[in-house]
Image (spheres, grey):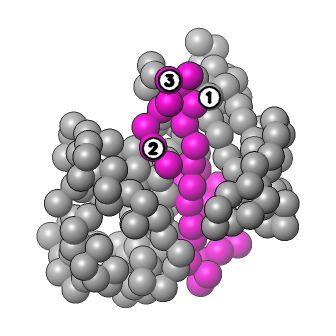
C-alpha cells in the first residue's frame, strides 16, 4: 500500500488516514499531535465535533492495513491547510465489485460544493480500480441536500434498506463504466 495516496481536486486534498493514526484517533478524536507532521491542522476538531466512522474503521484497519486507502480520508482545504471534511468507503470492494461511500462536511463549510467535489475525487480514483464495478451511495429520504447531489449526478435509485443507526436509507448506484464515461470522458 502506498502510505498516503493523496487525491487532489481543485480545492481539496483527500489524505489517507494511515494505519498508525487510527489508534491515536481512537484514543482522542482531537489528538493534538496527530496531523502535525502531515502539513495541515485541525482547528475545527473535525472528528471530535462531527459524526465519524472511526469506531467502525479502526477494527478493519487493525485486521487489514491494506484497506487504508479505501476506508477513511481527511479532506483538507488547500487554501487554508485545515481539515473540513472526511470521506471514505465503508469497506473495500465486495465480491461483486460494489463499493459504498460515506462522507461528511463540517457545518461551517457546507453549501459550498465541497461535498460534490470530494465525491468526485473519491469516485474518480476508485473507478480505475479493476475490482470496482459499482458505486453505491445510501442516503436518508429526509436528507434533501444529499438527495439533490446524488440525483444531479445521475445515480439511479435501486432500492432501500434499514441502517441500524441511520434508519431508512435509499440506495443509489452507478456502474464504474457509466461514471468514467459521464465524468472522466473515458468510454471503457
In the rendered structure, does residue 113 fall within the stretch colored magenta? yes
User: The magenta stretch spans which residues?
Assistant: 90-119
User: Is 5 situated left or right of 70 in this image?
Assistant: left
Residue in the foreground of this view, choosing between 183 and 63? 63
The answer to whether residue 109 is above or below residue 23 is below
Q: Which residue is mark 2?
A: 91
In the rendered structure, does residue 17 fall within the stretch colored magenta? no
Residue in the foreground of this view, choosing between 30 and 35? 30
Quarter holding the N terminus? top left
Q: Is residue 154 at all visible to an observer of this figure?
A: no
- Labels 1 and 2: the sequence-earlier one: 2
Percent coordinates x, y for residue 181 in the rendering? 67, 22
Q: Are marks 3 and 1 in contact (CB under 8 Å)?
A: no
Q: Which residue is mark 3?
A: 95
Quarter holding the C terminus? top right
User: Is 64 situated left or right of 121 in this image?
Assistant: left
Q: Identify which residue is drawn at 32% across, 42% down.
A: 67
User: Is 24 situated left or right of 78 in this image?
Assistant: left
The answer to whether residue 67 is above or below residue 84 is above
For label 1, the crowd category at 10 Å Cα-Cα, with few meaning under 14, some 14 to 19 and many 20 or more, is many
For label 2, the crowd category at 10 Å Cα-Cα, with few meaning under 14, some 14 to 19 and many 20 or more, is some
Percent coordinates x, y for residue 14 in the rendering? 40, 56
Amino acid at each position: 500500500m502506498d502510505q498516503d495516496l493523496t487525491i487532489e481536486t481543485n480545492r481539496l486534498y483527500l489524505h489517507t488516514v494511515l494505519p498508525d493514526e487510527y489508534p491515536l484517533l481512537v484514543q482522542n478524536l482531537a489528538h493534538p499531535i496527530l496531523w502535525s507532521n502531515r502539513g495541515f491542522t485541525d482547528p475545527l476538531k473535525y472528528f471530535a465535533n462531527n459524526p465519524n466512522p472511526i469506531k467502525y474503521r479502526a477494527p478493519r484497519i487493525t485486521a487489514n492495513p491494506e484497506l487504508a486507502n479505501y476506508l477513511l480520508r481527511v479532506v483538507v482545504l488547500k487554501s487554508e491547510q485545515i481539515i473540513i471534511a472526511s470521506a471514505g468507503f465503508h469497506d473495500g470492494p465486495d465480491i461483486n465489485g460494489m463499493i459504498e461511500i460515506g462522507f461528511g462536511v463540517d457545518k461551517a463549510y457546507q453549501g459550498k460544493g465541497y461535498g460534490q467535489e470530494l465525491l468526485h475525487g473519491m469516485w474518480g480514483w476508485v473507478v480505475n480500480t479493476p475490482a470496482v464495478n459499482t458505486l453505491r451511495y445510501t442516503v436518508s429520504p429526509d436528507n434533501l441536500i444529499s438527495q439533490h447531489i446524488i440525483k444531479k449526478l445521475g445515480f439511479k435509485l435501486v432500492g432501500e434498506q434499514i441502517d441500524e443507526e441511520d434508519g431508512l436509507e435509499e440506495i443509489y448506484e452507478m456502474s464504474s463504466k457509466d461514471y468514467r464515461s459521464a465524468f472522466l470522458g473515458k468510454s471503457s
